[in-house]
Amino acid sequence: MFDFKNINAPGFALWQKYPKNGNLIKILHRRAVLAVVFICIVFIGILWRLINIMVISSDKNTNSIHNRDQIIKKADIIDRNGELLATSITTSSCFADPSVVIDLNETIKKLSRIPGMPKIDKIRHKLKDRNKHFVWLMRHVHPTIEKQIMDMGIPGIHFQKDYKRIYIHGNLFSHVIGCTDIDCNGVCGIEKHFNNDLIVSDFSNKKLQLTLDLRIQSIIHEELEAGIKMFHAKGGNAILIKTNGEILAIVSLPDFDPNNLKKYSNSDMFNRNTLGVFEQGSIMKVVTAAIALDSGSSTPGSIFDASTSIKVGKFSITDFKGKNRPLTLAEAIVFSSNIACAKIAQKFGTKIQKEYFKKLGLLERLHLELPEVGAPLIPKDWTEISSMTIAYGYGIALSPLQVLATITSITNGGIKINPHLVLQEDKTLHERVVSEKTSKIVRELMRGVVLYGTARKASVDGVDMFGKTGTAYKRKGRKGYGNQANRDRLTSFVGGFPLENPKYMLLVSLDSPQGDSSTHGYATAGWNVAPIAKNIISRIISLISDGNLSENKTLSIQKYLKLN
């Protein structure tokens, strides 16, 4: 209430001005309402700014920047025995909110002093757009560096949880497991093939179990590396597979460390076993023998004249250290005669050869849980001459794994296998490619190669091994195979054990090995890859053997061999 007697009382002047109609109360009410409205407008403005910063602007930049939802964690990868091969570790990564950076130049100056930070120009480029709210500055920061940055207290510089992929055994499984980029997206190998399947939540215990065996992979890697060094080869590869298709070890050299990709070239990341396709040389004679026997065109005792070379246009089909006499089919394989094998192919013909190659899966890309799988190179015009050269390993280029899978299918009883890298429940194999009788004879022919032929240096005491060597000259572009003096070779051995009920198959190859005094100057497969195969089997036999591997059985093909 106003004090009407005191002219100095608050509001008296207003009352005197509006004495009759009580307009003062209305004015005060109106001013109060205006004040409330003003406060509400200010509050709404602040709220809108917060929403704009936290939601709308963030959504606008989702496609151009990383955000919390894009941080990926991948499942562990383990070997067949549960040994850890690849895992994801929790790290911390540094990011900036350019919209709240106060002093750009001072911020850049401070950050540039941090080890591992981008150069000044790059930092400036990242921070100059003040409309952005999230840019990475440094990923997977070491804890000491993180503390150093946090102690600076720079406005707009923050850290968040991140994940980094770690490969426990470095380069040992590099070509198989592959690697990821900095965001944990698969770049190659298993990581790329199963990229989406491997993504898991923070609390998931999901694991991907492979058929590989860490122990065997390590031994084969070590022996192959030693062989490359001994024979001065450019590279090499090796695969050990079970006769049901499970790949126990697969090594390609040179390789790379997926934990540190910066120092490696594209050639280091090339998987020779699956992506490389090569003319395989004499190991393809195993396929030729199987076709001849299974089609009924020949028997182990069928005779083929290898007395003289075969003239084909301006080229000749010859034998390396040939017998220069008629040979049985058994002798053609045991003594690795190009001439005889070409004539064996002539006998069963191009049509039958192509039918068996199709049945064996040699005319299409191999199905495998890797993106790096090469397609076979086959003749455009499959002529009789093509059939003859293919019979001893030229004129068709295949990956080592595809060849190993084919020869495994022929020798395991004649049932086609599907090589695989992910451990799965045993599946009954039922697709027959050759008869059981053919399979048994082919194994005996390959046993003869180990006992009497070019694979004698692969023989392991106490193991009834069977095998075949191959030495193929490498093409030099369109110029053919080069001169005799400068030809590069691909040498290979493929074989398995035990003889009667084979369980394991091995392939070993060297790229351009050199002869020396220990090999009497020879650079052929019998002198280099055969000894490597022997060393591998000698070391792994105790890990995989579950019974007697030697029966000292007399070969049924013995009667078709003249060993002088």
Image (cartoon, grey):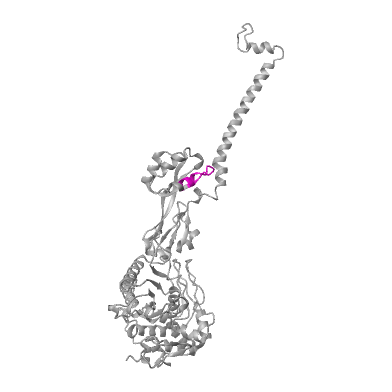
Depth check, front residue: 510 or 435: 510
Residue 309 seen by the camera:
yes
Question: For residue 281, what is the image quadrant?
Answer: bottom left
Q: Quadrant of the N terminus?
A: top right
Number of numbered labels in the structure image: 0
Question: For residue 81, what is the image quadrant?
Answer: bottom left
Depth check, front residue: 518 or 292: 518
Extent of the magenta region = 122-135
Residue 111 forms part of the magenta stretch: no
Residue 133 forms part of the magenta stretch: yes
Depth check, front residue: 22 or 546: 22
Q: Residue furthest top?
A: 5
Q: Residue at x 64, y 11 (%)?
A: 13
Q: Quadrant of the C terminus?
A: bottom left
Tell me if residue 72 comes above or below residue 526 in the rendering.
Answer: above
Task: Residue 493: give x, y in percent of width and height.
Answer: 37, 78
Tell me if residue 411 comes above or below residue 125 in the rendering.
Answer: below
Task: Residue 461: give x, y in percent of width and height.
Answer: 29, 79
Task: Residue 373: give x, y in percent of width and height.
Answer: 48, 69
Residue 296 seen by the camera:
no
Tell me if residue 35 comes above or below residue 59 in the rendering.
Answer: above
Task: Residue 233: give x, y in percent of width and height.
Answer: 35, 72
Q: Is residue 385 left or right of residue 493?
A: right
